Image (tube, rainbow, N blue to C red):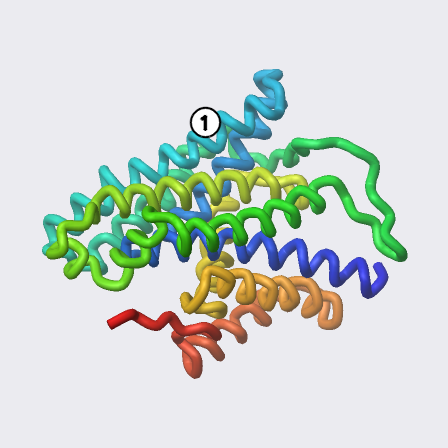
């Protein structure tokens, strides 16, 4: 494999990690909470689509719509039935809610295995066309869709957060949930919107990435960890920060095993995590809270 093709693979992995990290970012900014169920939402997006196409003979676009709605629905259930009641009963404590969401992560994985099976299914392409040769590299249809969606998602959400009333409310609630409540802002509604948008984003991301290596009910945990690490590396100082973190991890994921072989990328990711947790826990871009 040539160097340019490797860089394309790194870009593809980086976009995937960055989109998952963006889903984390939305919930963190809008609800002040790390939603570790992001990975399982993405898994449902990819696995449900493949199952409906392969075993129920459903049109791929209809299957994708069902899967994306299912991912968003799980996000709504996570907020309304798990996070909000647990935080209310614990006086707003974060640790009980984090433990509850960890349970949600494994529950969704088991539910995915029960409904769709425990084998790895091939991902489904929303568009099929011949691979596009660009110089010395070949760009697959799934890559075109993933890269295009990454640009649209980041640019669209950056504009939404900056220029719309709902986006400004999202930032206000994220700056201080307590102050936003005292000012009479619709904190619960904003939190729910953050969860819904993150669920939609994760579901689409999962089904767009699934054609690269397939998807199984066990994909949720590894995707959750990858997205979380990308957000930690990028930080929360900008909507684009998760993409920077994702691209860095994508390069590690592709080039470390290329040069060192085997499962060395696992140690590479662990090394990056240790470096950032030890010396730059706030990430590359630090969020400044407005006074």
Q: State whether residue 54 is above or below residue 192.
A: above
Q: State whether residue 29 is above or below residue 111.
A: below
Percent across and percent down for residue 279 are 43, 83
Residue appearing at x 46%, y 48% in the figure = 39
Residue appearing at x 71%, y 67% in the figure = 255
Label 1 crowd bin: few (<14), some (14–19), many (20+), radius 10 Å: few
Which residue is the extreme one toward the bottom? 279
Residue appearing at x 36%, y 36% in the figure = 74
Query: In the displayed structure, does residue 147 sit left or right of residue 17?
Result: right
Q: Quadrant of residue 168?
A: bottom left
Which residue is the extreme one toward the right? 135
> Which quadrant holds the N terminus?
bottom right
Residue appearing at x 40%, y 76% in the figure = 281
218 or 228, which lies in front?
228
Percent across and percent down for residue 152 are 58, 47
Query: In the displayed structure, does residue 18 sit left or right of residue 285?
Result: right
SS at mark 1 in the image: helix
Which residue is the extreme one toward the top? 57
Q: State whether residue 3 is above or below residue 213.
A: below
Percent across and percent down for residue 5 are 80, 58
| Residue receiving disc 1 | 115
The reply to whether residue 203 is visible in this rendering is yes
Q: Quadrant of residue 90?
A: bottom left
> Which quadrant holds the C terminus?
bottom left
The reply to whether residue 230 is visible in this rendering is no
29 or 86, which lies in front?
29
Percent across and percent down for residue 157 are 47, 50
């Amino acid at each position: 494999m040539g160097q340019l093709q490797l860089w394309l693979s790194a870009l593809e992995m980086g976009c995937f990690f960055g989109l998952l990290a963006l889903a984390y970012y939305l919930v963190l900014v809008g609800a002040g909470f790390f939603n570790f169920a992001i990975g399982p939402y993405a898994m449902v997006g990819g696995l449900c689509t493949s199952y409906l196409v392969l075993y129920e003979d459903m049109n791929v676009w209809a299957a994708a719509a069902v899967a994306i709605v299912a991912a968003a629905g799980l996000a709504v259930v996570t907020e309304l039935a798990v996070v909000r009641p647990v935080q209310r009963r614990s006086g707003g404590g974060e640790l009980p809610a984090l433990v509850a969401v960890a349970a949600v992560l494994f529950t969704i994985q088991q539910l995915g295995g029960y409904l769709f099976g425990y084998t790895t299914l091939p991902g489904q392409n929303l568009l099929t066309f011949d691979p596009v040769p660009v110089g010395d590299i070949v760009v697959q249809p799934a890559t075109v869709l993933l890269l295009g969606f990454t640009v649209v998602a980041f640019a669209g959400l950056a504009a939404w957060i900056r220029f719309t009333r709902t986006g400004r409310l999202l930032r206000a609630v994220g700056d201080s949930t307590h102050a936003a409540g005292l000012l009479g802002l619709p904190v619960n509604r904003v939190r729910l919107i953050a969860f819904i948008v993150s669920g939609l984003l994760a579901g689409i991301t999962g089904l767009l990435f699934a054609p690269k290596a397939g998807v199984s009910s066990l994909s949720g945990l590894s995707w959750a960890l990858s997205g979380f690490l990308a957000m930690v590396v990028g930080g929360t100082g900008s909507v684009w920060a998760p993409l920077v973190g994702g691209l860095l991890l994508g390069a590690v994921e592709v080039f470390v095993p290329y040069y060192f072989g085997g499962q060395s990328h696992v140690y590479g990711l662990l090394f990056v995590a240790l470096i950032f947790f030890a010396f730059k826990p706030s990430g590359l871009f630090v969020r400044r809270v407005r006074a």
